[in-house]
Image (cartoon, rainbow, N blue to C red):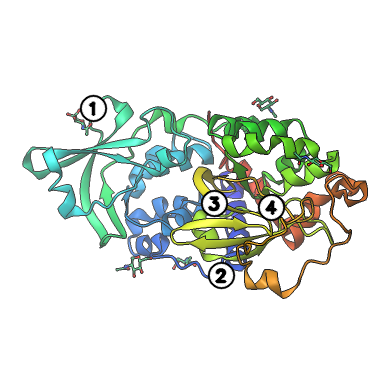
Amino acid sequence: MQLRLSAAAAAAVVVISSLSLFLLPSTVDAHNITRILAKYPELSTFNHYLTVTQLAPEINRRETITVCAVDNGGMGDLLSKRLTIGAIRNVLELHVLLDYFDAKKLHQITDGTALAATMFQATGSAPGSSGFVNITELKGGKVGFSPEENGGVISAYFVKSIEAIPYNISVIQISTILPSPEAEAPAPEPSQMNLTALMSARGCKVFAEALLANPAEQTYESNLESGLTVFCPGDDAMKSFIPKFKNLTAAGKQSLLEYHATPIYQTLAGLRSNNGLTNTLATDGDKKYDFTVQNDGTGVTIKTKIVTAKIVKTLVDVNPLAIYQLDKVLMPPELFKAAASPTPAPAPAPEANAKPPKKHKSPPAPDAPSDSPADAPDGDVADQTANGAGAAARFTGAVILSLGFVFLQL
Ligand SMILES: *[C@@H]1O[C@H](CO)[C@@H](O)[C@H](O)[C@H]1NC(C)=O
Ligand SMILES: *[C@@H]1O[C@H](CO)[C@@H](O)[C@H](O)[C@H]1NC(C)=O
Ligand SMILES: *[C@@H]1O[C@H](CO)[C@@H](O)[C@H](O)[C@H]1NC(C)=O
Ligand SMILES: *[C@@H]1O[C@H](CO)[C@@H](O)[C@H](O)[C@H]1NC(C)=O
Ligand SMILES: *[C@@H]1O[C@H](CO)[C@@H](O)[C@H](O)[C@H]1NC(C)=O
């Protein structure tokens, strides 16, 4: 079983990396943890599991981090617990500190102790303080590591520095795996993950409720396994939009909601470096329902011909699901008329200009029933937008889920 999972996971990695190469052509990673660890045979099991759990690419795209590796014996102890791959991922995430600690810095910690947030904490899956690691300088130059939930009992010690690339990544070896009942707890089944509850709890309650009451929710669900990025308008934005929303036909409502998600998993870094037109769950044949992603300083904006919204917050970012909060509702030209503009509208991206959208219906009044995107049979939208990636993505999604990557808890 273990072997079959690994093989499947390797296949998933291949599919995913080719997908992301295709989708995010300009992303350049600062380092390659797989390559760094490959020089140390005694860390090969740890390295192998960074790949199997898909953590390696997550580590590569982050900067200012510290990876606390353990030797093959330490990994043996972890593996003997027969955890799910999802739980192993949680445990390994606890070994990635979101700050830079090389040997020198470890021995010069202010006041001799520090609390480091970890990737386990950053995924939002760590309850309470369990995503933090306490680092303490001890007598005789020793440095101890302890998960915060461990009640101050030091469980692992700094062994040696493996590689240091200031201040991008430090790889160190510690004596044993950090014990964490929370991280080791079995990840919830995918079926237990509740997209709308997740959004509700984190600032997009009004949008989540609209989604719950609409068939669009099924479109979201059916993309959850193969990759989904949701751009949910925050509660204030959505509240003031409700009168316009209520004015739409049933089909229009569905399209509007489906317009707020893309059928692929996109990181913030990916969005930032991947400007251009993006299809959405509402895209279906000549119903373009696309928008333009544009970086704006360090931020990211989403432009339709009618509004420019900003990503204000990352609610969830755990492959294959990302949820970002927007400051505005995205209004597609398919459903809303662009305001007759004496003030120049924000300039659309070049691609958007190249082909003026051919409106299949004029005027694109919200009430026009034949404008209805829901003319498409249920499920079609998701299938079409998933595109060539379809079968592969579905397979990948299944593998990912079987690996237990979705372990979000509320
Ligand atoms: C650190 O990361 C930055 C940004 O990715 C990169 O430009 C730089 O070359 C990296 N530094 C080293 C020493 O690799
Ligand atoms: C990282 O290094 C490994 C081993 O050398 C290689 O197989 C992999 O393709 C590299 N990943 C990236 C993103 O360059
Ligand atoms: C880390 O743990 C030690 C030992 O229990 C404790 O004295 C220290 O205050 C903790 N450090 C932080 C930053 O919480
Ligand atoms: C998700 O949670 C909402 C409440 O936020 C509930 O109404 C809905 O039935 C749940 N969905 C599933 C699939 O459990
Ligand atoms: C609702 O639609 C009607 C008719 O198209 C329009 O006159 C009205 O302004 C719309 N209301 C809102 C809030 O958009």
How many angstroms separate mark 3 from mark 2 (CA)? 23 Å
Query: Is the residue at mark 1 in contact range of ligand 3, meaning its CB lies under 8 Å from it?
Result: yes
In the rendered structure, which amino acid carries the disc numbered 4?
Pro
Which is more N-terminal, label 2 or label 3? Answer: 2
Few, some or many C-alpha atoms within 10 Å of disc 4 (few <14, some 14-19, many ≥20)? many
Which is more N-terminal, label 3 or label 4? Answer: 4
Assess whether mark 2 and mark 4 are in contact (beta carbons under 8 angstroms).
no
Q: Nearer the viewer, mark 4 or mark 3?
A: 3
How many angstroms separate mark 3 from mark 1 (CA)? 41 Å
Q: Which residue is mark 3?
A: 310
Q: Which residue is mark 4?
A: 263
Q: Nearer the viewer, mark 3 or mark 2?
A: 3
Q: Secondary structure at mark 3?
A: strand
In the rendered structure, which amino acid carries the disc numbered 2?
Pro
Residue 114 percent location from the top left of the image: 21, 39
Residue drawn at x 49%, y 61% is 296
Q: Nearer the viewer, mark 2 or mark 1?
A: 2
Q: Which residue is mark 1?
A: 152
Residue drawn at x 38%, y 63% is 38
How many angstroms separate mark 4 from mark 3 (CA)? 20 Å
Q: Secondary structure at mark 1?
A: loop
Q: Which residue is mark 2?
A: 25
Few, some or many C-alpha atoms within 10 Å of disc 3 (few <14, some 14-19, many ≥20)? many
What number is the disc on residue 317? none
Q: Which of the two residues, 138 or 384, is positioned nearer the viewer here? A: 384
Residue 53 percent location from the top left of the image: 51, 48
Q: Which of the two residues, 90 or 38, is positioned nearer the viewer here? A: 90
Q: Quadrant of ligand 5?
A: top right
Assess whether mark 1 and mark 4 are in contact (beta carbons under 8 angstroms).
no
